[in-house]
Amino acid sequence: MGTRRGLFFGWVGVLLFSGTVVATRFAVRELDATFIALGRALVAAVPWLITLALRTMPAAHGAVIIGLLPMVTSVLAVLRGGERPSPAFWLASAAGLLGILAFASTRGAHGLDRADLLALGAVVLGAIGYCEGGLLAREIPAAHVICWALVLAAPFLVLPMVLTIARTGLSGGPVAWLGFAYVAVMSMFLSFFAFYRAMAEAGIARVSQIQLAQPILSVLWSAAFLGEQIDAATGVAALFVVACVLVTSRTRVRIAYPVPEAP
């Protein structure tokens, strides 16, 4: 029951995460990227790097690069969380990753430029954050993890944000501010309530694989709200990736050493 409930919360979190690149794309059209990164939740480098990347990178392109996040998180779950996924898990995870990379090639993601490197940096830091947050959520309530993270980070980031506002101002239309509000409240706050609880109940490695579906969802939002083109390759990739996610969610993940149960 706990695993099934955890997977449900994982899907809720990923659904909220999937709107991040689209909302950020709206916000950076009129608001300064550094202000968005610091102000959206007053957290550290992860939103800053992806926000800088999305100034020049299409939302769909950014979404598929972020698709690398589940595999990196799973590796960290093994190294830090003591989780030992089965061979079937790794095969399905690798298949999903290959599906994402093949999908990226159909969206024009050939080679790396500065924006890609920034997005990859966000992937590495994001994986570390997810893994450590999942470990903490085994010991304290998931809501407390993200709230304490924001509280502890705030004093160090208020001054840079004030300096950024003084340099760039705060001129933006309703759409830009709506995008900022989404990433501040939904992407960087409420979504973590669900996602950290999911990792605590169903395992970091297993829940992280649900994020394989995030790029597909993000591309759908990009098509709906940004007018970015969507084609048959997206449908094929969506079905394949969701199948891989379903396989990973049903495989066994062994814990190498005991962990406290989530409250």
Image (cartoon, grey):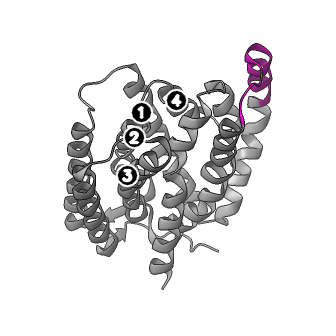
The answer to whether 248 appears left or right of 91 in the picture is: right
The answer to whether marks 4 and 2 mark residues whose Cβ atoms lie closer than 8 Å is no
Residue located beneath label 3 in the image: 70
Tell which tag, 3 or 1, sits nearer the viewer.
Answer: 1
Residue located beneath label 1 in the image: 58
Residue located beneath label 2 in the image: 228
| Magenta-tinted stretch | 158-173
The answer to whether 113 appears left or right of 147 in the picture is: left
The answer to whether 232 appears left or right of 113 in the picture is: left
The answer to whether marks 1 and 2 mark residues whose Cβ atoms lie closer than 8 Å is yes
Q: Which disc is residue 49 wearing? A: 4
Residue at the image point whose x is 60% and y is 62% from the top: 137
Number of residues whose C-alpha sits closer than 10 Å to that of mark 2, classed few (under 14), some (14–19) or many (20 or more)? some
Task: Look at the picture and state if 144 lies above or below 180.
Answer: below
**Residue most extreme to the front:** 227
Residue at the image point whose x is 67% and y is 66% from the top: 141
The answer to whether 62 appears left or right of 259 in the picture is: left
The answer to whether marks 3 and 2 mark residues whose Cβ atoms lie closer than 8 Å is no
Check disc 2 and report its element: helix, strand or loop: loop
Amino acid type, label 1: Pro
Amino acid type, label 2: Glu
Q: Position of residue 114 (x, y in %)?
A: 39, 19
Indicate the quadrant containing the C terminus: top left, top right, bottom left or bottom right: bottom right
